[in-house]
Image (tube, rainbow, N blue to C red):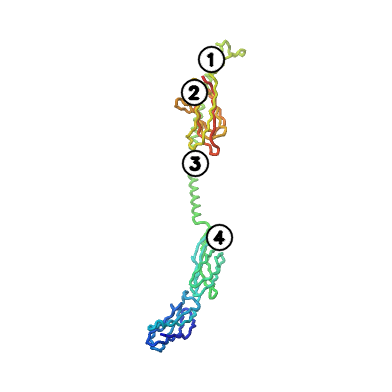
């Protein structure tokens, strides 16, 4: 056996920032001169020291060694019982080394720090802060937070009013300050206030803060309104001085020009009326001559000449063209039906055209003349403008022998309505 060690006491107490000592008696239990190294192991090792750290002993000889414990005042050194061991290592007989155990009780100290972040905040209706609380002591701390407004001008809302902080930690508590009264315009108003942080033991801490209350109306609003008023005044002045006279002058000139045109047309109408009067007199004279040629006298009402009624020539014809046109996206795409007159050696004289659109289809219909491949559009009509449409001609449409009649439709119905189904009926005579 290389060594023995005996502690003078195994229970010690020390306050952070102070120190405490005990003694260990080291004895050479071997048969050789030996050197012994003494140190402290365990959680207390960083702040413990053996004095001296090395002793040389003859066989059977003993020597005292002082063990000093000096925990710093730091949150990393927790309050409470800290086990330790004093280790004695033999150089000649390492397996004969020994460890004596004990406990040192570290006292508690309180350290709290608090501040508002930011210390000053601005707002028209409210301002937001965070209360930062640090536990710089070596024991857990339970704290209560209480906002204080000496002037009673602010209302406060805390996320939480009580917190528990382990040693060496920080907590952030959100705080909102709201003025009891607001104002539309004016200089900013300062509202100082405090947040009291009260520990379970010890004096409370005070964190100072300020809310700078601004006006509700934005600062740019009044200059913008003034600028708008000046612009409106400038526009009114421009209207009164430049635009309104120019408009009146243009209106006056237009009225004068219109009056001149009306006067000219009146003169032309009077001249035409005079000419018509002269023509009427001439027509009356000619009528008298015509009556004389018939053996009648002007003013004679007993005898009325019978004029022969011209007889219509040719064979009456009527034919109908029906068409079904699918819906197309391109308004220039047409579906067409070609009609060839049954008697290709006769000329058709069409006096009446009847268009029928019973479904009120939408699109465009065309009636086309096809003369040996040369096409001429006779009529173009919008389907949406009619359901039944009649057209009569004083001078009939003439289709020479061999010419064809083409009925074309471009259907623009909406999809649910389906295809277009208009028709056309042509009435006349064939000679």
Residue placed under numbered mark 4 in the picture: 182
Classify residue 150 by image quadrant.
bottom right
**Residue 42 percent location from the top left of the image:** 45, 78
Tell me the element at label 2.
strand
Q: Pointer 1: residues within 10 angstroms few (<14), some, or many (20+)?
A: few
Earlier in the chain: of badge 4 and badge 3, it is 4
Q: Which residue is tagged 1?
A: 286
- Please tell me in which quadrant of the rendered image residue 157 appears: bottom right
In the rendered image, which quarter is residue 390 located in? Answer: top right
Q: Give the mark nearer the N terminus: 4 vs 1.
A: 4
Q: Which residue is mark 3?
A: 244
The residue at which mark 2 appears reads as 399
| Residue 155 x %, y % | 56, 64
Secondary element under disc 1, as helix, strand or loop, is helix
Q: Earlier in the sequence, mark 3 or mark 1?
A: 3
Distance between the Cα atoms at labels 4 and 3? 47 Å
Question: How far apart, in angstroms, are the residues tagged by discs 4 and 1?
Answer: 102 Å
Gap in angstroms between the C-alphas marked 2 and 1: 39 Å
Disc 3 vs disc 1: which is toward the camera? 1
């Amino acid at each position: 056996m290389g060594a023995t060690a005996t502690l003078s006491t195994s229970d010690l107490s020390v306050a952070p920032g102070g120190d405490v000592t005990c003694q260990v008696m080291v004895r050479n239990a071997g048969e050789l001169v030996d050197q012994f190294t003494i140190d402290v192991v365990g959680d207390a090792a960083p702040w413990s020291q053996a004095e001296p750290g090395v002793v040389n002993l003859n066989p059977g000889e003993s020597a005292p060694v002082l063990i000093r414990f000096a925990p710093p005042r730091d949150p990393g050194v927790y309050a409470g019982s800290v086990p330790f061991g004093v280790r004695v290592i033999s150089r000649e007989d390492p397996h004969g080394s020994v460890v004596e155990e004990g406990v040192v009780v570290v006292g508690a100290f309180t350290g709290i720090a608090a501040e508002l972040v930011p210390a000053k905040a601005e707002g028209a209706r409210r301002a937001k802060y965070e209360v930062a609380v640090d536990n710089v002591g070596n024991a857990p701390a339970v704290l209560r937070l209480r906002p204080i407004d000496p002037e009673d001008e602010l209302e406060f809302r805390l996320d939480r009013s009580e917190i528990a902080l382990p040693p060496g930690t920080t907590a952030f508590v959100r705080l909102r300050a709201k003025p009891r009264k607001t104002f539309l315009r004016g200089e900013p108003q300062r509202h100082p206030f405090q947040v009291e942080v009260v520990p379970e033991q010890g004096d409370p801490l005070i964190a100072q803060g300020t809310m700078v209350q601004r006006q509700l109306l934005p600062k740019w609003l009044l200059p913008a309104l003034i600028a708008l008023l000046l612009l409106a005044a400038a526009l009114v002045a421009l209207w009164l001085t430049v635009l309104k006279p120019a408009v009146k002058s243009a209106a006056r000139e237009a009225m004068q020009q219109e009056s001149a045109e009306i006067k000219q047309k009146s003169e032309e109408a009077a001249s035409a009326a005079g000419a018509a009067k002269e023509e009427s007199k001439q027509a009356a004279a000619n009528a008298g001559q015509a009556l004389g040629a018939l053996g009648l006298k002007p003013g004679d009402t007993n005898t009325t000449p019978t004029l022969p009624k011209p007889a219509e020539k040719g064979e009456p014809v009527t034919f109908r063209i029906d068409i079904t046109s699918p819906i197309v996206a391109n308004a220039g795409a047409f579906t067409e039906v070609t009609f060839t007159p049954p008697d290709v050696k006769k000329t058709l004289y069409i006096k009446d055209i009847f268009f029928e659109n019973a479904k009120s289809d939408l699109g465009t219909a065309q009636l086309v003349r096809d003369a040996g491949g040369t096409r001429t559009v006779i009529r173009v009509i919008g389907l949406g403008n009619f359901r039944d449409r009649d057209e009569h001609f004083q001078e009939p449409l003439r289709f020479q022998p061999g010419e064809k009649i083409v009925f074309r439709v471009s259907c623009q119905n909406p999809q649910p309505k389906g295809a277009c189904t208009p028709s056309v009926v042509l009435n006349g005579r064939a000679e």
